[in-house]
């Protein structure tokens, strides 16, 4: 049991400290998209799925098309920020404050590999090993949770993936500060990946209950 625990600890440390290699940069893809035209084509394809023989085949036909529609609709309402080979799409966020004055915000973004022929890894492991933080000009906030599998999100060439990072109550080792929201302050998401850095304005608004 002790050996298993040690091996697990070493594996976790390796994942959380992994730094991706330099990526093979290619000519960036064109970011301008005719959203209405592409959405129209996808919706026509979606209609054809209803002609499949049974509900399972209908669902299998619809899934990749609905996934592509969701990404296009998200891009349509987002600002795009290019960092190295990755284009980050962000559509704004809301902060929810509880009766106990605990603030929580979920940062949802779409990351697209537009400039590398390799699979690019986005990294966010534990509280002490994450390349994504919130900064308000005075203080840096560490995430409370995220959906990075094993601390990384891999994005193959020409593909895109959603990811979520939650900031709120302090969680776990190395994170001792709750996220604080002050509407008079400006907040940015600090990205500090090996392939590039950026401060993305979050334009947070208070969620009305």
Image: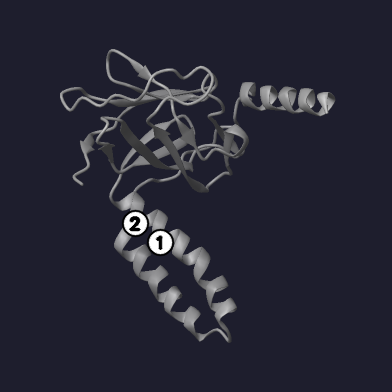
Q: Is residue 20 left or right of residue 209?
A: right
Which of these two is toward me, 14 or 35? Answer: 14
Q: Is residue 153 left or right of residue 201?
A: right
Q: Quadrant of residue 98?
A: top left
- Identified at 26% across, 30% down, the residue is 101
Q: Which corner quadrant holds the N terminus? A: top right
Residue 169 spot, x, y in % from top left: 39, 28
Q: Which mark is residue 69?
A: 1
Residue 106 spot, x, y in % from top left: 37, 39
Tag 2's secondary structure? helix
Q: Is residue 52 left or right of residue 83?
A: right
Q: Is residue 123 visible?
A: yes
Tag 1's secondary structure? helix
Q: Is residue 25 above or below residue 10?
A: below
Residues at marks 1 and 2 touching, judged by CB atoms closer than 8 Å: yes
- Residue matched to label 2: 73
The mark tally for this picture is 2
């Amino acid at each position: 049991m002790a050996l298993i625990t040690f091996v697990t600890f070493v594996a976790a440390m390796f994942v959380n400290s992994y730094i991706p290699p330099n990526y093979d940069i290619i000519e960036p893809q064109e970011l301008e998209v005719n959203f209405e035209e592409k959405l129209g084509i996808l919706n026509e394809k979606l209609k054809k799925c209803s002609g499949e023989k049974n509900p399972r085949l209908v669902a299998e036909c619809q899934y990749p098309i609905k996934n592509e529609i969701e990404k296009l609709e998200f891009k349509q309402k987002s600002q795009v920020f290019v960092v190295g080979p990755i284009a980050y799409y962000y559509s704004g966020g809301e902060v929810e404050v509880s009766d106990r004055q605990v603030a929580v915000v979920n940062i949802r973004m779409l990351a697209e590999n537009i400039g590398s022929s390799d699979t690019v890894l986005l990294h966010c492991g534990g509280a002490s090993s994450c390349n994504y933080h919130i900064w308000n000009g005075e203080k840096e906030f560490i995430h409370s949770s995220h959906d990075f599998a094993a601390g990384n999100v891999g994005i193959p060439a020409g593909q895109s993936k959603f990811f979520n990072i939650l900031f709120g109550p302090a969680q776990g080792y190395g994170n001792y500060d709750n996220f604080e929201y002050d509407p008079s302050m400006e907040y940015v998401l600090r990205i500090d990946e090996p392939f590039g850095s950026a401060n993305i304005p979050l334009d947070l608004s208070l969620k009305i209950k």
